[in-house]
Image (cartoon, coloured by chain):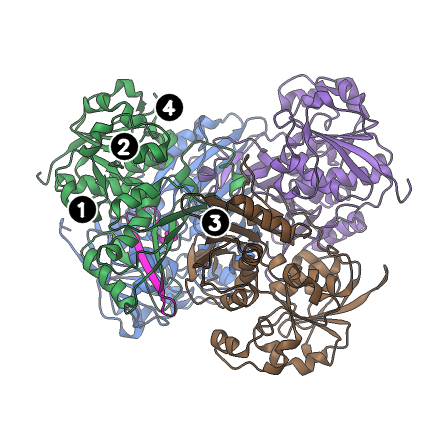
Chain colours: A brown, B blue, C green, D purple
Amino acid sequence: MTGTEQLSVAIVGGSGYAGGEFLRLALGHPHLNVTQVTSERSAGQPVALIHPNLRGRTNLKFRKAAELEEADILVLALPHGSAAKRLAEFEGKARVIVDLSADFRLKDAELYRQYYGEDHPAPDRLGEWVYGNPELHREELRGATRIACAGCFATSVILPLYPLLKLGVLLPKDIIATGLVGSSAAGASPTEASHHPERAGSLRVYKPVGHRHTAEAQQELPGRFPLHLTAISTPRVRGILTTVQAWIPDGYSDRDVWGAYREVYGAEPFIRIVKVARGIHRYPDPMLLDGTNYCDLGFEMDMDTGRVVLMSAIDNLGKGTAGHALQCLNIAHGWPETAGLEFAGLHPA
Amino acid sequence: MTGTEQLSVAIVGGSGYAGGEFLRLALGHPHLNVTQVTSERSAGQPVALIHPNLRGRTNLKFRKAAELEEADILVLALPHGSAAKRLAEFEGKARVIVDLSADFRLKDAELYRQYYGEDHPAPDRLGEWVYGNPELHREELRGATRIACAGCFATSVILPLYPLLKLGVLLPKDIIATGLVGSSAAGASPTEASHHPERAGSLRVYKPVGHRHTAEAQQELPGRFPLHLTAISTPRVRGILTTVQAWIPDGYSDRDVWGAYREVYGAEPFIRIVKVARGIHRYPDPMLLDGTNYCDLGFEMDMDTGRVVLMSAIDNLGKGTAGHALQCLNIAHGWPETAGLEFAGLHPA
Amino acid sequence: MTGTEQLSVAIVGGSGYAGGEFLRLALGHPHLNVTQVTSERSAGQPVALIHPNLRGRTNLKFRKAAELEEADILVLALPHGSAAKRLAEFEGKARVIVDLSADFRLKDAELYRQYYGEDHPAPDRLGEWVYGNPELHREELRGATRIACAGCFATSVILPLYPLLKLGVLLPKDIIATGLVGSSAAGASPTEASHHPERAGSLRVYKPVGHRHTAEAQQELPGRFPLHLTAISTPRVRGILTTVQAWIPDGYSDRDVWGAYREVYGAEPFIRIVKVARGIHRYPDPMLLDGTNYCDLGFEMDMDTGRVVLMSAIDNLGKGTAGHALQCLNIAHGWPETAGLEFAGLHPA
Amino acid sequence: MTGTEQLSVAIVGGSGYAGGEFLRLALGHPHLNVTQVTSERSAGQPVALIHPNLRGRTNLKFRKAAELEEADILVLALPHGSAAKRLAEFEGKARVIVDLSADFRLKDAELYRQYYGEDHPAPDRLGEWVYGNPELHREELRGATRIACAGCFATSVILPLYPLLKLGVLLPKDIIATGLVGSSAAGASPTEASHHPERAGSLRVYKPVGHRHTAEAQQELPGRFPLHLTAISTPRVRGILTTVQAWIPDGYSDRDVWGAYREVYGAEPFIRIVKVARGIHRYPDPMLLDGTNYCDLGFEMDMDTGRVVLMSAIDNLGKGTAGHALQCLNIAHGWPETAGLEFAGLHPA
């Protein structure tokens, strides 16, 4: 690449929240030129009609996927199952494909069947995709042309656990992750559950057991241990706060947790360890991360019991989806890893 | 009536928010016995499935309107137009009918056509209905068998203005009412506009001009003056806060406003004048009124310009709809006016 | 007691949220007559100035505690430590004392010292108080004159676990409870942490380990097992949603959980089992409980791992504090247990 | 200036929200180098402790104002009155001073006394300051060294009215502006009014008459007409939505309003006219503007009455304060006007 490289990008399924967020980020990226955005339902309309934050920022109009022309990069923001079923169609259009859905995240077609309830449409292709998480797969991402962007809740579970499991700082006991998730994670289509009067004041346990991202997290995390996920929706629009309950071995202390995070994430541009003794913002809080690509991590220990509470906060549309995807693309193309991802977040917010 | 009188009530269209709120109130009323609740879509299901606050409070199930049996009182909570078109059907079922829709509020069929865009289905029947506002029509409500419950925004405009216009405390100049309205006022059906991620943080001007309740307010308020309404949706679920900008004649002061309110509303059980010099709750605030039948009124004057800012707060489903309707029924039947409407509201809330 | 019994009640520390909520409930109680409310800071002012929901409901004014006169019942809503230190003062004023603080909840003075960081001011008196939880201590509460109202988070942990531990439906493994708590639980005094711009959008882990209510829950729950609590503040004002992660033995299923709840709570007036297969309100949700005395319980099982996720929802000021206290008083005096606690909660809310 | 010019900037009073927002923007500005941030209360602490969104973005620590060293630009984010009283102190430190307070906005010391209740500390200096509003004073801002940044509510009133009054599209009748304001506008210090349980659900009329920004708006807007302001606080943290009720002369239509906006604001980089016939985002909405420097304008007409409802939306900390100030600095120094102000805002948000 050179400092002036410009690649064209087409966003397929651009009227949803993940596609819209990627569009926002790509419009401010020095090496990307968004040339096409598709939406079956809104074809012909300006993208700013659906994403009104982009008024004055782009004159792009939605087109139908059938009208898709070639581009350097294709970003697929489609419902689960679509990317795998229409893979040939998309591979004819671009050299690089980033899929934001769950279709190519799992390496094991059987696991896919178990969690998604149907046979994988392209099981022999699963091995070609890199799991889109820079902290775990940076080297594989360099030059990658097939990137399966990590799931948002999965990311909030994987990032706090990875260094500790990798370096043996946790016991192989039951690990429990509880995710508090904003409403945008359920997508842009209105439902009874998303109707404002039913949702605005709600704390709704929507997936107490059996969350699909368990499979991703188990695949990506080192070692064998029981991992349990519970997901609760909150009145926030964006953001995930995940608390992870785990146990450290005798003789270990919070210094070992600190050490593991520093060793593994010390050079990471989007991981911050938040554990402050003063003030009111002592631990990770998604309030501070809307629009950013950060994953803030924190922890606290109960020395009497060996319990450690890990905490992670992300923007589900940022580090949870579109920001994460752009970070992967930056790595794949050798661009500065933070390009297009500079927004610091707001305070107050 | 006697102290033990029990009348049966059927709620038609009981899966919406207005019907559900009337159901909640009626279940706690000493003289009402809810025997039927209809819903075309949820027929056969327990009402508590749709109104989960009523779990353990009632075993009623929804039935279809076609299965409606006779009752003493029919409460119609249907979309605008339905009550008027199906009037004969409903009149065969009960002696007393309360309509929560706009169908019989206006006395003038031409005004109806102008604001609702079609000919009134039963224009010759308009004169038979009492406009369901106890503060203005208490005497007509006694013994009434046809009650057209006042509109929620209209109520929040009428109640602060009525005493001042009646007693000549306002100039016949332009009066401007700005209503901040909760999301429940748009009903129980999900739409793109009510999708939580689009609505939770929104301050959305949804009816800057041409609000239909202008007609009701003009009909009910004494005198001739230009009345202008603007409606804005807020992140609250319930509640309307309306500020009314008006002008008082030279020589008048806030004492005259106080006096008018005291004279006209001094004995009203559900009107409170809120104008406090200390503390943080100095004016009406819908936060305090969820679930209640109060209309809180306040005001402030600018002596330099003669401008007076009137303020009203209600729960749109309480004093704005279902509570108001129950208060009318209490009057119609000679029951204590506050029966079933005793809830004080919460603080904090 | 007789149907017309009227006891006088004085609320000490009535300008806070717990005292205010008890006042609201007591004003609507058929056998209670609130005669005094104290507040050092607001002495001389109408209680409705601080609790504006009570405008028009009471003309009571705050007085100083030093001016307290005798009453039948004293409800102490003071900061932790005050009740124990001033016990003699209060015992001279009333036959029945209900303490809403933590002072007399623990039976073990050593445990108190460990969790509250100081010696208990009246350790020899601990045995005289009944732990104010009707579901566990109904018989002891009959005729009780010293009631130590249970903690709000503790209640949300104890109620879902008690039947299962009592009947041996859980393994003696680590149990983890994660509580999502509204801002009113931190009291009525402004702090930096409660400043609206810092709190409105926040999901803040405020007590990942070491929560004081661990001690209460351990004391009240049968059996020996490690209990771990994590508390997170949410943007709600009222309400606690607690998820409890526990494990059932081989051969047990959700039928056993159902069975235990039915056996132990089948006749409880304020416990509802919420586990619905249809609709959007499938599990307990504090949204529906503001102002009520309900504790809604639900659960879901992961048959592959034996994990069971228990869920409880309460209003922290209702079943969590003031409602719970009133239920205890009803039992203590032989009044109907639901007297004054009839509010059903709102939907939508 | 050259493309690589770097000026040092010191923020005085940087622990508040306005100072913090300016700091966030300045850290991303190509020509600004923040070298000092003062805070009396937090001196010695990292700025990221108070503004946690800036973790990892800056290592700056607060210092006391007494330790202030010279800089090219001083941004004063102090309480009203401080800048004027300590002007000599600040003028010794920098060539360029931007004041975010109200001290130097009014040209008329008598008007200041009337609205701020005390004599102006430096009345002879008022004429030296440019009112910091680029749309009205761009030419004066070029090369300016004393900039008094416009008030946030004033800006939301001035921008929708200015073109219409300048071009005679409005009648000289009473104009009424109603502002819905987020909680951050009241600053970073906790009060009873800002306590989350009291504010989260509140719609609070906090300034029905007599708002100080009336003076600014009257000063800046052409023509003589009565201007009336009412301010209401909403549950949002950021943002102002202002509706302005005004009247157009006979023979004028919405084309004239469009025309005036196009003529006066056609080249403005931060003004967008939002008036869309389709979709759910038809008018300005502060939800879309958090963190941006936009002022979105819209309007709707009632042809029967000649009433026009103007609408404006801003982020009170963006275009309302810190963004506005930076835009002024960009103009003053001949930098690209959008430098550092590129953030598009989020959707959903």
Both labels 1 and 4 in a single chain? yes
Pair 2/1: label in front: 2
The magenta stretch is: C286-308
| Chain of the residue displaying label 4 | C
Q: Is residue D100 left or right of residue B137?
A: right
Which residue carries the number 4 mark? C42
Q: Secondary structure at mark 4?
A: loop
The image quarter in which residue A24 lies:
bottom right
Element type where label 2 sits in the image: helix
Q: Amino acid at mark 2?
A: Ala
Left or right: D159 in relation to B3: right
Residue under label 2: C109
The vertical placement of C10 against A258, above or below, is: above
Q: Is residue C45 visible?
A: yes
Query: Residue C288 lies in magenta, yes or no?
Result: yes
x and y percent of residue D37 in the render?
71, 31
Q: Amino acid at mark 1?
A: Glu
Which residue is identified by label 3? A309
